[in-house]
Image: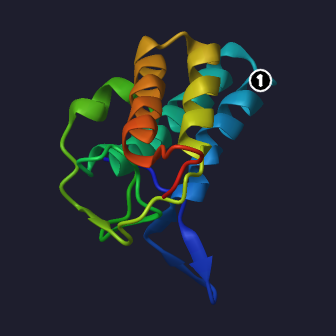
Amino acid sequence: EEVFKLNEEVHRLQNRMDELACFTPGMIALGASGYGPEDSRKFLSLAEEQLSSCLHCFASLCSLLGHAITSSSQHLQNWLGRTISSMQDSFQDLSVGTSWNILRPKTVESLFYLWQWTGNKTCQEWGWNIFEAFEKNSHMESEYVG
């Protein structure tokens, strides 16, 4: 299962998440530092679970560059106890809402914060893989393009 930051539009929730929402795992990880060990672990677990959803946006395209919008037809729950290592699970119920990338670094920022906070090398590896994907697919002679 995955955790989405759901959008509220005209007083109803949508199972849609913009890549911009991928700053949330980093924000949650930073906020976890203000709590005791038990509560902090719960918040970090939530952050890692949502980050897993963000990483799927990147992994689902051949370029490894995430698309701007992803949606799911299911409400997603049960984030406690799951870690980023569950990224190896398949994500069958997601659909790509857009096929472009607008060069937002939100997922990479969250990867950095979670790596700093947890020491999880997977976060560091994903950050590097995404950086290399930007270099390969978006770098032009004088600029980056989406």
Q: Amino acid at mark 1?
A: Tyr
Query: How was the colour assigned to the protein in this rendering?
Result: rainbow
Question: Residue at the location (26% across, 50% down)?
Answer: 60
Q: Where residue 140 sits: x, y (%)?
A: 49, 46
Local crowd at mark 1 within 10 Å, few (<14), some, or many (≥20)? few
Q: Quadrant of residue 113?
A: top right
Looking at the image, residue 61 sits to the left or right of residue 47; the answer is left
Q: Where residue 129 sits: x, y (%)?
A: 38, 28
Give 45 or 113, whichever is nearer the viewer: 113
Tell which residue pokes out farthest to the bottom in this image.
Answer: 10
Give 31 or 138, whichever is nearer the viewer: 138
Tell which residue pokes out farthest to the right in this image.
Answer: 34
Looking at the image, residue 29 sits to the left or right of residue 63; the answer is right
Give 133 or 17, whichever is nearer the viewer: 133
Callout count: 1
Tell me, yes or no, if residue 124 can be seen here.
yes
Q: In what element is the residue under mark 1?
A: loop
- Above or below 141: residue 71: below
Q: Where residue 97 sits: x, y (%)?
A: 37, 72
Question: Residue at the location (31% across, 47% down)?
Answer: 1
Question: Residue at the location (29% across, 46% down)?
Answer: 63
Question: Residue at the location (56% across, 18% down)?
Answer: 115
Residue bearing the label numbered 1: 35
Q: Quadrant of residue 70?
A: bottom left
Tell me, yes or no, if residue 79 can be seen here.
no
Tell which residue pokes out farthest to the front in this image.
Answer: 141
Give 135 or 88, whichever is nearer the viewer: 135
Q: Where residue 48 sits: x, y (%)?
A: 49, 32
